[in-house]
Image: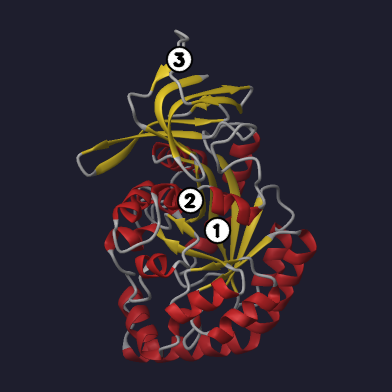
């Protein structure tokens, strides 16, 4: 597979040239134009490494496209997979919530069905992107640790995040913000909200700390990458670092992001935060962390198209110090290194032929083609 007349986005520079993939691996690159007749003309577009998504719950939307509508599992998986590659994402960590009962049981009810669809589709070669598992562990529940221990041996478990969404914790350090968010989302009366809040505080006090320690220990033993989630203070970050976390997912404050970066945790923020210019929940803005030099990884989170768009927006933002190559690394080389996936994430000889050809129409950058190991998947 040969592509010519493209702007190759390498780790440290952008070079106009051609690229050849053999047996799924980048075999050769040149700054000249290939003269071989079978070469695909990229029409001067950008050729990027395939994007790597570490945290997306996009699959949920296909399993339940409307309230109380459960969609057939493999149909949902196929549609989700197609949307990923259409947005240039060739490696996907599908995040599944363990112990999350806040939605009335939908996530826990479909958990095993979703996981079976992810694992079996990947095993049978039915997916265009490579799909792996990200186990999101909601800590304040008695069922979380036993369920994690059941799932941690599955093939493809590549990332585990530790979450506590109870009042007074991490994202909800402010009890008032917790009440506003929860009451608005679940339409609870004041009495119902009081009961729910009391219950969640008690569950967190009982289960969060022991579950956090036990799950982190399992991850260290099995060499599974561990991530903190919504750290808000330097004390939170110190605890996460002590447990062996390699990634700091969505730190809610500038202080937490700076502390994470100092301790060597890779700071992951949402690409929608970049597109919108702010966090939808009022936390620290991702572009602010980019300006401070402490943004390491971007995730599309709830909107797959945001990932590629965010890279070009960051590079065009004069208030940020990141070049286009550095911005692209936020969703390619950096997440690959954080997971220990040293076979991908860069356009370099010997790396996987996971590639994305992108073009611009006015201010919109879009995916023209995508390849996984040299095979065109979009």
Residue 254 is situated, as x and y percent measured from the top left of the image, at: 43, 78
Mark 3, residues whose alpha carbon is within 10 Å: few (<14), some, or many (≥20)? some
Residue displayed at 34% across by 56% down = 314
Mark 1, residues whose alpha carbon is within 10 Å: few (<14), some, or many (≥20)? many
Mark 2, residues whose alpha carbon is within 10 Å: few (<14), some, or many (≥20)? many
- Is 165 displayed left or right of 147 in the figure? left
Quickly name the residue at label 3.
39
Given residues 174 and 111, the one toward you in this image is: 174
Quickly name the residue at label 1.
96
Residue 207 is situated, as x and y percent measured from the top left of the image, at: 65, 83
Quickly name the residue at label 2.
331
Q: Is residue 330 visible?
A: yes
Q: Is residue 187 above or below residue 328?
A: below
Please report contact status of discs 1 and 2: CB closer than 8 Å, yes or no. no
- Is 29 displayed left or right of 41 in the figure? right
Please report contact status of discs 3 and 1: CB closer than 8 Å, yes or no. no
- Is 47 displayed left or right of 141 in the figure? left
Residue 64 is situated, as x and y percent measured from the top left of the image, at: 41, 52
Among all residues in the image, which is located at the extreme right? 221
Residue 38 is situated, as x and y percent measured from the top left of the image, at: 46, 10
Q: SS class of the residue under badge 2? A: loop
- The numbered mark at residue 236 is none
Q: Counting residues from the N terminus, which is met first, the one under dot 1 or under dot 2?
A: 1
Among all residues in the image, which is located at the extreme top? 37
Q: SS class of the residue under badge 1? A: strand
Q: CA distance from mark 2 to mark 3?
A: 27 Å
Q: Is residue 163 above or below residue 311?
A: below
């Amino acid at each position: 597979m040969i592509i010519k007349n493209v702007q190759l986005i390498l780790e440290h520079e952008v070079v106009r040239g051609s690229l050849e993939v053999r047996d799924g691996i980048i075999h050769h690159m040149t700054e000249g134009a290939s003269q071989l007749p079978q070469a695909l003309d990229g029409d001067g577009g950008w050729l990027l490494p395939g994007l790597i998504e570490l945290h997306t719950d996009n699959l949920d939307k296909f399993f339940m496209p409307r309230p109380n509508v459960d969609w057939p599992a493999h149909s949902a998986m196929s549609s989700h997979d197609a949307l990923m590659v259409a947005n240039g994402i060739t490696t996907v960590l599908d995040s599944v919530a363990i112990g999350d009962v806040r939605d009335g049981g939908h996530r826990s009810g479909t958990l095993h069905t979703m996981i079976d669809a992810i694992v079996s589709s990947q095993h049978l070669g039915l997916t265009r992107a490579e799909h792996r598992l990200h186990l999101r562990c909601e800590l304040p529940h008695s069922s979380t640790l036993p369920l994690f221990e059941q799932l941690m041996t599955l093939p493809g478990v590549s990332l585990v995040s530790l979450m506590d969404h109870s009042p007074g914790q991490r994202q909800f350090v402010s009890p008032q913000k917790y009440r506003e968010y929860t009451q608005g989302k679940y339409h609870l009366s004041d009495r119902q909200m009081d009961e729910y809040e009391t219950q969640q505080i008690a569950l967190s006090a009982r289960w969060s700390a022991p579950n956090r320690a036990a799950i982190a220990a399992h991850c260290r033993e099995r060499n599974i990458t561990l991530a903190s989630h919504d750290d808000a203070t330097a004390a939170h970050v110190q605890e996460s670092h002590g447990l062996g976390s390699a990634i700091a997912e969505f730190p809610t404050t500038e202080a937490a992001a700076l502390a994470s970066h100092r301790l060597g945790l890779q700071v992951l923020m949402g690409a929608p935060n970049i597109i919108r210019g702010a966090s939808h929940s009022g936390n620290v803005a991702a572009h602010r962390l980019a300006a401070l030099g402490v943004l390491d990884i971007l995730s599309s989170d709830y909107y797959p198209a945001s990932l590629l768009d965010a890279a070009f927006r960051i590079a065009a933002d004069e208030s940020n110090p990141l070049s286009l190559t550095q911005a692209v690394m936020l969703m390619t080389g950096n997440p690959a290194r954080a997971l220990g996936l040293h076979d991908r994430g860069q356009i370099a000889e010997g790396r996987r032929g996971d590639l994305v050809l992108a073009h611009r129409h006015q201010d919109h950058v879009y995916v023209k083609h995508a390849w996984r190991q040299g095979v065109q998947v979009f």
